[in-house]
Image (cartoon, rainbow, N blue to C red):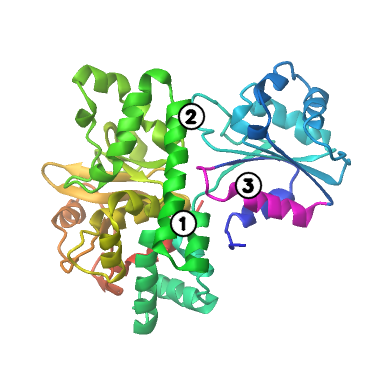
Amino acid sequence: MLKRKFESVLNEWLKNDKVLLVDGARQVGKTYLIEEFCKKNFDNFIEINLSFIKDANSYFEHVKTVDDFLFVITSFSKKPFVPKKTVIFIDEIQLATKIDLFTLSKPLSQDGRYRFIFSGSLLGVAEFNIALEPTGFLYTKTMYPLDFEEFLWANGVQDEIIAKVKDCFNKRIPVPDYIHTKLINYFYYYLLIGGMPEAVESYINNNDLAEINIVHKAIEQHYVRDITKYAPLSSRPIIKQAYDLLPSEISSKSKRFTLSTLGSRSFVRKAENDFVWLANAGVAISVYNANEPKIPLLLSKNYRMIKLFASDVGMLTYRLLDNDVQRKILCHEKEINYGAIFENAVAQELLAHGFNEIYYFSSKKQGEVDFLITYKGNILPIEIKSGKNYERHVALDNLLNNKDYDIKEAFIFSDANLKVVNNEIYFPIYMIGCVERFN
């Protein structure tokens, strides 16, 4: 079993009496982790997967009370429901749109006879309209693919090494060379494999890129099936086209998703918000342009300028590269343009570490900076470099020198070791996971 940070979320939920709702893209490991956790922590475990129940939604049409709800779900299970000892796990909850979790969570929590966990994918899309906002009785959390630290755990990297890296990050000192070389190698592996649990386990058990590609292909087929089945009917063509274009847009010169590539101007206006369905479904990560690098970034969010990254970097490289290029990545060959792939990994890490609002900055006068986040109360520009000229970043320098913005420091990530030059801090790319959001 892969060690996952999300288990701490489950342990925290265990301490309260709330209903838990777990969201996340397909194949990120939600079901398996919840199953193992419930078996370990409860005497009686009831699991109901609505995808195995024909017309499951119709059963909940007249559910108004807790007793109504319990009567329905007992018909799905052959195991007895034992009060005070039972956890009820309902998977693929998005298939029961007639359940109002927002309203039902309070009486379920107050009833106290059973504990409840709901889990599903696509919960953020309008088709299902499942409540994702936390309430006093609904504990809502999103699970992501394995981040790089979890990938290191899976590969048996010792906790002492990871602790040393975090210490170097905090003290702003270089990582010992033998650790740096080792983790750079693992990071390049991560670019190819990504964080989907089945892909990681395939790598650990078989060390075979061909088998990993088969895993990625199967996941992609799930994504495409969801688009053709659940996306709004009128928007399916543009959502599918956006999904197909995602690798080429990421690897383009601007690395920006250009809406005009999707069709006529009137068609683009109509679909401007529709194609963000991919982000709401957990298939992509949306990064909007901020017109000004000032707090709060939300006030300068430009909805017409957006970058879409894949929710998993391994899925991106699977779609982007052939076997020969994968071999070149393993060898760190410099003829490959790693910029887009590095950026995708960074967007994935930032999201996994609590930065739900990620931006970039683009100005005709000052240039473009890869990412902007709010970090420890200040605007933090982040630049991603994949080549030898990682110390050259004109747009970032312009931003730092602009007194109107009063930016304290900037982070630059590359495959070089750590060093500090005035208010520009150069980190090795694997340290992006050390940047965490603190409440």
- Answer with mark 2 or mark 1, whichever residue precedes in sequence: 2
Residue 435 is at least partly visible in this image: no
Instruction: Give the main secondary structure, helix, strand or loop, of the magenta stretch.
Output: helix
Q: According to the image, label 3 marks what residue?
A: 31
Residue 387 shows in the view = yes
Of the numbered discs 3 and 2, the one sitting upstream in the chain is 3
Under mark 3, the amino acid is: Thr
The picture quadrant where one finds residue 430 is: bottom left
Q: Distance between the Cα atoms at labels 3 and 2?
A: 20 Å
Asked if marks 1 and 3 touch (Cβ < 8 Å), the reply is: no
Q: Residue farthest to the left?
A: 365
Tell me the SS state at disc 1.
loop
Q: Which mark identifies residue 125?
A: 2
Residue located 23% across and 49% down the image: 251
| Residue range highlighted in magenta | 24-42
Magenta run includes residue 30: yes
Label 1: which residue? 195
Proximity of marks 2 and 1: CB atoms separated by less than 8 Å: no
Spatial CA distance of label 2 from label 1 is 23 Å
Query: Which of these two is toward me, 79 or 45?
Result: 79
Q: Residues within 10 Å of mark 1 (few under 14, many from 20)?
A: many
Residue at the (30%, 25%) spot, across then down? 272
Q: Tag 2, which secondary structure?
A: loop
Foreground label between 2 and 1: 1
Tell me: 231 left or right of 429. right
Gap between marks 1 and 3, in whole Å?
Answer: 16 Å
Q: Amino acid at mark 2?
A: Val
Looking at numbered disc 1 in the image, what kind of residue is underneath it?
A: Gly
